[in-house]
Image: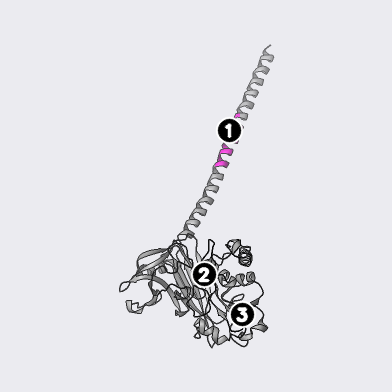
Amino acid sequence: MATELQEFTQEEALKKKIRQKKRIRGCLIVLNALLLCYFSYLVVDTIVQKVVEKKQEINNEIIQLNGKSSSKSKEIYEKYIYKTVDVNDFATYGKYLLTSSSRVSYDDLHFENEIKLINLLEDNFTAESKFYFNLGSKLDEQLDLCSLDVGDYMICTSITQTKGIAYHYTGDDLLEITLYSFPDELNHRKKITIRGKESSPALVISIEAINLLPKDNYDFVVIGNESELPIFKNTNYQVKYVTTLKEAYLTNASYAINLLDEEDTIISSNYVSLDTKKPDKIIGSAYDSLDSENSIRELGGYVFNAGYGVKKEVGEDISKASLEIKSTGKEVRKGKYTLSVGKKITLKDIESLLGVKNE
């Protein structure tokens, strides 16, 4: 009997030890699970924090001036800006910059009638050393970008002796448009870049001197055959010849020429100041003041709402041209200054109209 009781006691003690071990093992499992969850939380939280910090860093970036650091660029901005005025949109047409307090369009061409530019890289800026521009009501009476010398510029509505009210772009994302001047006699050019970002103090126009036009960039895109318009042979101009309006639209150029059957004709948009033949305007649609000439209207890009179509009753040809551009799915802010010309037009005629002065 005593032996049986002793065995029972030992068995109960063993069971108790097993239960204790199971409880300890269970606690350890739960504790490890909690530690794993906590560690995972720390990892995820760290990643999220880094992403947020990186996003904030990007959103707080300012446009750097001539390769200077952000802090040095900020000092320069603060030196020249005492107030800002918001620009909600900008685009180009040929070599001209258009800005707007709302959306840039053909009938809202100038944000301010008179503007001044400050070269932010000048060491000894004075109120007398600024550039004045009197903006007109035509596309080619806006800010002439090719007239600027090398430097980083901001646009101002007014200037005191050393500071101005600067144009400030309100878009969250960086908007950047780059174009190139025509070559001079030595084949030198200017690279012109307009940059704006909400987190940066001012809209900036950067002018650099370059020797070569980058690959896949052109001075002119011509809708027609080279044999029919050979005027660019043996010149420094870079020209691409295409057969369709869609190809011309997608070509990276600031100027376009549409070849006509009429021999001595030059047609320009109703919205430029050139003394040439003007196309009719589309009547009876949502865009009833646009140029009816397809290439002029559609190659104007963003400024002319290219690819947004017109009512079918104004002509199948017009609607077809708009649909062709819309099918690209690409909104081109660098509008092409477009001329429709006859086959007997000379290069000198075109240069004279575009104000080419060995830029």
Check residue 27 in the rendering and tell me which mark sits there, or answer none: 1
Magenta residues span: 23-37
The numbered mark, 3 or 2, whose residue comes first in the sequence reads 2
Report the amino acid beneath label 3.
Answer: Val
Residue 284 location, x and y as percent?
54, 62
Q: Residue at x 58, y 81 (%)?
A: 265
Disc 3 marks which residue? 239
Q: Camera-side residue: 326 or 19?
A: 326
Q: Residue at x 32, y 76 (%)?
A: 127
Disc 2 marks which residue? 177
Left or right: 250 in relation to 112: right
Report the amino acid beneath label 2.
Answer: Ile
Residue furthest to the top: 1
Residue 210 location, x and y as percent?
53, 80
Is 31 rendered above or below residue 279? above
The CA span between labels 1 and 3 is: 78 Å
The numbered mark, 1 or 3, whose residue comes first in the sequence reads 1
The numbered mark, 1 or 2, whose residue comes first in the sequence reads 1
